[in-house]
Amino acid sequence: MDLVAGFGLIGLTVIVSGLVAGLVDRGPISFPMIFLGLGLALGATGSLQVDAHNPSLEVVAALTLALVLFMDAFSLEGGGSRKDWLVPALVLGPGTGLVILVVAGAAILLFDLPPIQAFLLGAVLSSTDAVVLRDVVRDERVPRPVRRVLSVEAGTNDIIVLPLLLVLIAVAGGRNAGSNPADWALFGVRVFVIGPVVGAGVGAVGAWLMARADARYSVRREYQALYGVGLVLASYAAAVALGGDGFLAAFFAGLAITALDQTLCDCFLEFGDAAAEMSMLLAFVLFGALLSQELGSVPPLAGLGLAAIVIFAARPLAIGTVLSIRPAALSRVARAFIAWFGPRGLNSLLFALLVVAGGVPGGEFLLAVTGMVVMVSVLLHGASATPLSGWYGRRVATEVLAEERIGTATGLFERNDESSDRIGVAELAEMIRSDDPPVVVDVRARSQQDRDGVQIPGSVRVLPGSVPEWASTQLKDRPYVLYCT
């Protein structure tokens, strides 16, 4: 791809994304559907020629994956307490392992793949996609803890999958074939130590420097925003230069910033999000053009069969098994909703491209199979996101569901036997008439408030799932009284 074609493709991606944004917000369609389809059309007509070793695709893919991993880690703090992500990540981790096993077994049966290639495909297709999920996790009709579980899973399972994928690529590609244990130990240090340590160091020092510089000199917002992208690139480059993995470094750079809890400009996250989004959409176009040439190598029935197993069997089985091991305060509606929304998308394609770049025999076939599964998933999950979120919202409006009473994702998986102090109606009325009246907070479920049709005069309305976030912004020395269903 020459310079003019590259500029034209970037311009087209940005323009189309702006024009269709309103349509995506209102209809059963998603950005991945649009841009993957655009890439398929450009590739099928010969307007855009891309192969699996195209330098432009490799650059865009590497940048996108590094940005996505960094933003996933950096966003773990957002929208909840620090421990909000811990329990769902630990609980859903075994689910990722089960998906890998099921998909690998199906790949052996359907494509007669060698076990190592089958497990590679299982690892690639175990990654859920935050881009396809975006419409769901932003829809406030869906109870907040459910949205948080989905976003945390999409943001953390990549870091579970990536190290395993790197090891499998090394084994399948024969990189360390015939090596002695010392060579494998060195490989483990490069993957599991150098990358994370370098990334964490760059993120920690970089965040500390910006926090100090901003406090002393008041750094302008636009430069703070660019600074975040600079940390992503610096952590990736530093880790690779020292023999480590740049993608793990990017994730741990974001994680270190979160762990340090530095006071950083909100633009630090906003610009990174925007840059990652544009990079993702451009990657979808390039992958679409690539898949228009590669899909012909996949037997259609076997490819669609694997997609059906991934979407309709592996994901629900994994979620059902995990929730039976670690029970959660979820209604049947929520369990079905979480089981359905485990889309495969850009991250799976990026991981499959790593397999090709690693020199794995049959890597391009694995990429083509991944592409077929991703296409089916993008279509089904993208088209169902808005209708199913609306249906879920209507259920919430008509009945009180278990998950609506919980404030955080962690709370879904924890048992809390502590009882709160209670007061009666007469005591509350007396407190309200006093010189120091409490803040009365209405935390009834939406369905209960609609049925009651009344509210205590002067009370503040806060949805149950939003209580922790709301409380973090309130004064600590005032009395608060909450009333619910």
Image: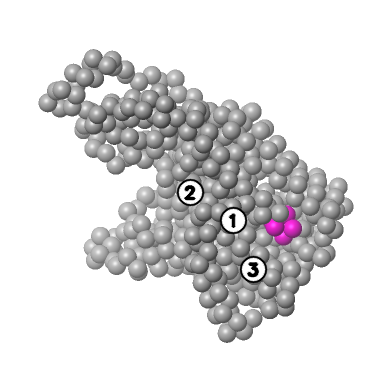
Can see residue 394? yes
Gap in angstroms between the C-alphas marked 2 and 3 = 25 Å
In terms of sequence position, does the residue under pointer 2 or pointer 1 come before the other?
A: 1
In terms of sequence position, does the residue under pointer 1 or pointer 3 come before the other?
A: 1
Counting other residues with Cα less than 10 Å from the Cα at mark 1, is it few (<14), some (14-19), or many (20 or more)? many
The question of residue 307 being in magenta is answered with no
Q: Which mark is residue 283?
A: none
Q: Are marks 1 and 3 in contact (CB under 8 Å)?
A: no
**Foreground of the two, 246 or 398:** 398
Query: Which residue is located at x 12 percent, y 26 percent?
Result: 435
**What amino acid type is highlighted by mark number 2?**
Arg
**Marks 1, 3: nearer the viewer:** 1
Question: In this figure, which residue is indicated by the disc labeled 1?
Answer: 29
The way the protein has been coloured in the rendering is one colour
| Secondary structure state at the residue bearing disc 1 | loop
Q: Which mark is residue 138?
A: 2
Relative to 70, does residue 286 appear above or below in the rendering?
below
In terms of sequence position, does the residue under pointer 2 or pointer 3 come before the other?
A: 3
Residue 120 located left or right of residue 129: right
- Which x, y percent locates residue 362? 81, 63
Q: Give the residues drawn in magenta, as a range.
A: 371-375
